[in-house]
Amino acid sequence: MSMDKKTGGLAGIIAGETSISTVGKEDLGLTYRGYAIGDLAAQATFEEVAYLLLYGYLPKRSELESYQRKLGSLRDLPAPLKTVLEQLPASTHPMDVLRTGCSALGCIEPEGGHRDLHTVSNRMLAAFPSILLYWYQFHQTGQRIETAITAPNLAAHFLNLLLGKPADETRIRALDASLILYAEHEFNASTFAARVTTSTLADYHSAICSGIGTLRGPLHGGANEAAMELIQKFKSPDEAETGLLTMLQHKTLVMGFGHRVYKTSDPRTAPIKELAKKLATTDASKNLFAIAERLEAVMWREKKLFPNLDFYSALAYHFCDIPTPMFTPIFVIARTSGWSAHIAEQREHNRLIRPTAEYTGPQPRPYVPITQR
């Protein structure tokens, strides 16, 4: 007997309990510890949301300022880690850079002793932009950049390191909001992988590496990169419609649309679409935005599929002059806050995650000696 198709990929299976977020509930939508994602994206900063996920409540102003200073103090990288990053090939995928950087930092600064979970979580959250951009600038420009405090928040810091100069407020706000939107999403594949690793009593860095490795796969991460490639294939909205119809006729997979959990819309799409629209200030960027909107309209008309967070995030990042291969690594930087919250929750009520499988192989049969085969 084969597995019921409804349970393939564990779809619809409740695999545990969490108090961190709700996803896809008709009356709630997406919430982080009870706060609606729309409210957080419109009014909060990423540091506020990271604090909420890690500590369980929204910080007061003094707590937020203290937290921002703490993260700022944790951005610099140890010399041995810089050496590792310099030795990685320039052709390395940025996701692999983050995975290797996380593992290396776990060797240099292992969890344990006075380094409790929050200490390690905050260190990783602060260090990931530095890891990614130190490697990038070293191989692109030959510079060994300083990664210590350059701006009060992560979004501004990231853009400073990338662009080599302060970014404008519109770009900073767009990146900051996108980090909020990507920060947490219940038992998605990478979070569940991190929880499975945590359930074995593995260390924090091993769990985060599990999350990164899972997000590395194109069926979980990478949709924003694929969405950008799709949008850039076309020169006009009309060409985009014709091209997309051809793709659909040939049953080509179109990334950036639909979602395993949401049925009619992704609640994270509207905020990031609006930000991408604000960033479209040149004729070229306005054309790309128009192409994206036409693709959205055709996918809904033909397939009743809606754009997910990845689709317009791609445009927002592109308009911020962020290289396309860095799109999914930004996902990692944001989701580290959610992964860390889930690692803490798994440890608090831990039980080894070990599901069973339905066997579909041959029935019992006798072993035949090799001389008789």
Image (cartoon, grey):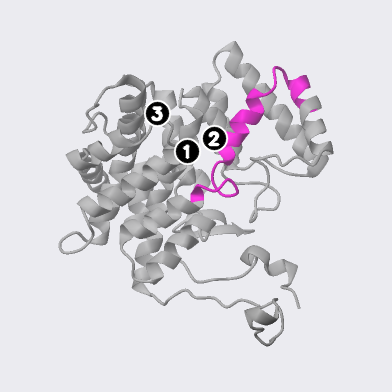
Q: Nearer the viewer, residue 105 or 155?
A: 105
Q: What amino acid is labelled 2 in the image?
A: Ser
Which residue appears at 73% of the width and 72% of the height? 4
Which residue appears at 65% of the width and 40% of the height? 255
Q: Quadrant of residue 165?
A: top left
Residue identified by numbered label 3:
172
Of callouts 1 and 3, the N-terminal one: 3
Instruction: From this view, report whether residue 47 is shown above or below residue 261.
Output: above
Which residue appears at 32% of the width and 60% of the height? 204
In magenta, the rendered stretch is 215-241
Label 3, label 2: how far apart the Cα atoms are:
14 Å
Label 1, label 3: how far apart the Cα atoms are:
10 Å
Which residue appears at 31% of the width and 63% of the height? 203
Tag 3 secondary structure: helix
Tell me the crowding category of disc 3: few under 14, some 14 to 19, or many 20 or more residues within 10 angstroms, Cα based: many
Q: Which mark is residue 178?
A: 1
* Spot occupied by residue 95 in the image (x, y as percentages of width and height): 44, 42
Residue identified by numbered label 2:
313
Tell me the crowding category of disc 2: few under 14, some 14 to 19, or many 20 or more residues within 10 angstroms, Cα based: many
Label 2, label 1: how far apart the Cα atoms are:
7 Å
* Spot occupied by residue 236 in the image (x, y as percentages of width and height): 72, 18
* Spot occupied by residue 27 in the image (x, y as percentages of width and height): 62, 59
Q: Nearer the viewer, residue 294 or 76?
A: 76
Of callouts 2 and 1, the N-terminal one: 1
Q: Are marks 2 and 1 in contact (CB under 8 Å)?
A: yes
Please indicate whether residue 228 sits to the left or right of residue 45 in the image.
right
Tell me the crowding category of disc 1: few under 14, some 14 to 19, or many 20 or more residues within 10 angstroms, Cα based: many
